[in-house]
Amino acid sequence: MPATTLTFSHVSFTYPDGTEALRDVSFSICPGEKVALMGSNGAGKSTLLLHCNGLLLPNKGVVRVGEMEVMKSTLREVRTKVGMLFQNADDQLFMPTVEEDVAFGPRNMQLPEDEVERRVTEALHTVGSEALRNRACHRLSGGQKRMVAIAGVWAMQPEVWVMDEPATGLDAEARECFIQIVASLPTTCLIATHDLSLAHRLCSRIIYLEEGCLQSDCKVVKNQLPG
């Protein structure tokens, strides 16, 4: 999987009801870097993540994936480069079976069917879910749904992974499996989490948001944070 930069330049966003969710946010993530996004509930983390692949567009400022500005005219290409892992896997799984769900992204990219098959097989193997291939998505456990959602993103081979509270609801074994998968990714990652231990294990930096403003952007000091 290739990797690319993710850049926010003076991004502000206000919802139609007048809620100011992001205020002049600027930062850049280097290719292959893993960065945690932290802050209290309502700080603007999910809103920021939705800007990464154009599910929301800024009122002011610019979001770039590599050299490409995220805007209406580039959304199709941006969404092949940015993989989004939602907080609730049920928001991500909508096809009848696991195989169809993991194949959806590559097929939407109009890849040849043999390449779609290869990616589905590789993705399910990577997350240890080969046995679920023909299962109905709605019959999976919460942890199984999370792994299938990860497989769906993996199959698209994005240059940037964006994750919203990805370890929520996982038991200890599934959480460790998730950490190992993300740690092995060569791609750029932005991970919104309340889990300081997860941020410490996976990330080189932590960005803190508060009331839509970037309060700090600091390096993770491995020997001063919990493992």
Image (cartoon, rainbow, N blue to C red):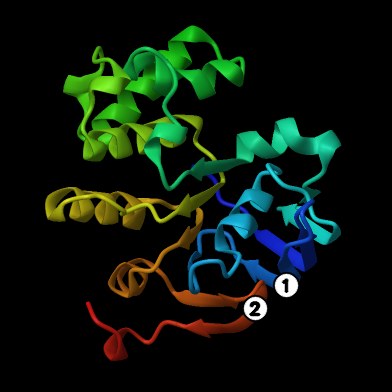
Residue for point 19% across, 48% down:
174
Amino acid identity at mark 2:
Leu
State the residue position of label 1.
26
Amino acid identity at mark 1:
Ser
Disc 1/disc 2 C-alpha distance (Å) = 8 Å
* Viewer-side residue, 202 vs 115: 202
Q: Position of residue 148 (x, y in %)?
A: 32, 31
Going by the picture, which residue comes out furthest to the top?
113
**Callout 1 secondary element:** strand
Q: Considering only order in the chain, which callout, 2 or 1, is on the residue closer to the N terminus?
A: 1
Q: Position of residue 138 (x, y in %)?
A: 30, 21
Asked if the residues shown at circle 1 and circle 2 are in contact, with their CB atoms under 8 angstroms apart, the answer is yes
State the residue position of label 2.
214
Q: Position of residue 176 (x, y in %)?
A: 19, 55
**Callout 2 secondary element:** strand
* Viewer-side residue, 89 vs 133: 89
In the displayed structure image, the side of residue 147 where residue 163 appears, left or right: right
